[in-house]
Amino acid sequence: MEASRQHTLFISSKNRVSGTPSSYSVVIPPSLCDSANDETIRITLQDLVLRNNFTAVQPYNCSFVATNGLVTSTVSLPLGSYNVYQLAETLEQLLPGWKVSFDPVTNLYTFDTGPGGSLIFDDPSLQNSACSFLGFRQSDRPVGGVFTSTLPVDVGGEEAIYLHTDLPSVQAVNIDDFGSLGVTNSTCFAKIPVLNAFGGNIVYQDAGDTYSALLSVSSLNQVRFWLTNEDGRLMAIPNDWTLTLKVTYLKPAQSYLPLLREIADSAHLILMRSLYPHMRLSG
């Protein structure tokens, strides 16, 4: 297929007709995304600009279960971004009587809980485990008066954000490692690396139609966008952000075979007439 025409769409979440910066819908004027009978629409992400002011602790990764003797309770970290020492202080405030220390050499926490203390991250009631912030796997259940993280503490937040859209015929799949272990249809349109520190801009610039979708419809009048982490959990995005889409209209590639045959036939006829000038040739 070959491009017959194209233009760009500049979209901002502040122009949404519904939703929040985390998940919103915008209206597309019909004249800006409407194909002719023989055209197919291709949508390409040209750029995306998002302020990195979403916190490392999000609603989907903030909780764990703690036992202190005979008392068991669900503990939720306040949403925010912490360094390892600030998080240790916060944990001590949330867990009265516990001592939490950080070893900068091993990058591990040590918990001194007193008799009967334990942590649980895979409790069925938890949909938002904070295990990585404390340096544990979700399956870990540390028990005892003193125990240490099993993994290096990770307070850095997301390494990438995932742009999803309800464009008809987004050509992507997900491999579900946590459920059926099968390949499923995906709404994920693009993966955007988080390369700048908190407060900077996250910028994606296309380098060759990397993220594109061929639409199964001839026109588009509304589209939804939302941002998640790698597990598909909706992120809490506090501020508006922008993206640019390139709309390309594709037509079937023109076939030059009939023309080439006509030229070849004409050339053959001219040759025959030059070789046999007295022969009657039709054409």
Image: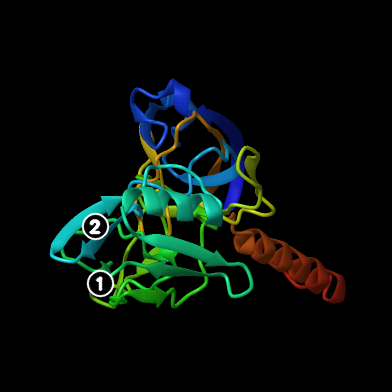
From the viewer's perspective, tell me whether residue 244 is left or right of residue 224: right
Residue 162 appearing in the image: no
Colour convention: rainbow
Q: Can you tell which mark lies on residue 115?
A: 1
Is the residue under label 1 in contact with that under label 2 (CB below 8 Å)?
A: no
As measured in the structure, the alpha-carbon distance from the residue carrying label 2 to the one carrying label 1 is: 28 Å
| Quarter occupied by residue 242 | top right
Q: Can you tell which mark lies on residue 135?
A: none
Q: 55 or 42, which lies in front?
A: 55
Please tell me whether mark 1 sits on a helix, a strand or a loop. Answer: loop
Which three-letter amino acid code belongs to the residue tagged 1? Pro
Q: Which residue is tagged 2?
A: 127
Please tell me whether mark 2 sits on a helix, a strand or a loop. Answer: loop
How far from the left and from the top, in percent, is residue 146? 37, 75
Say which residue appears at 62% left-offset and 67% top-offset.
Answer: 104
How far from the left and from the top, in percent, is residue 21? 42, 32
Determine crowd level at label 1: few under 14, some 14-19, many 20+ residues with C-alpha closer than 10 A.
few
How far from the left and from the top, in percent, is residue 251? 53, 48
Which three-letter amino acid code belongs to the residue tagged 2? Gln
Quarter of the image with the C terminus in it: bottom right
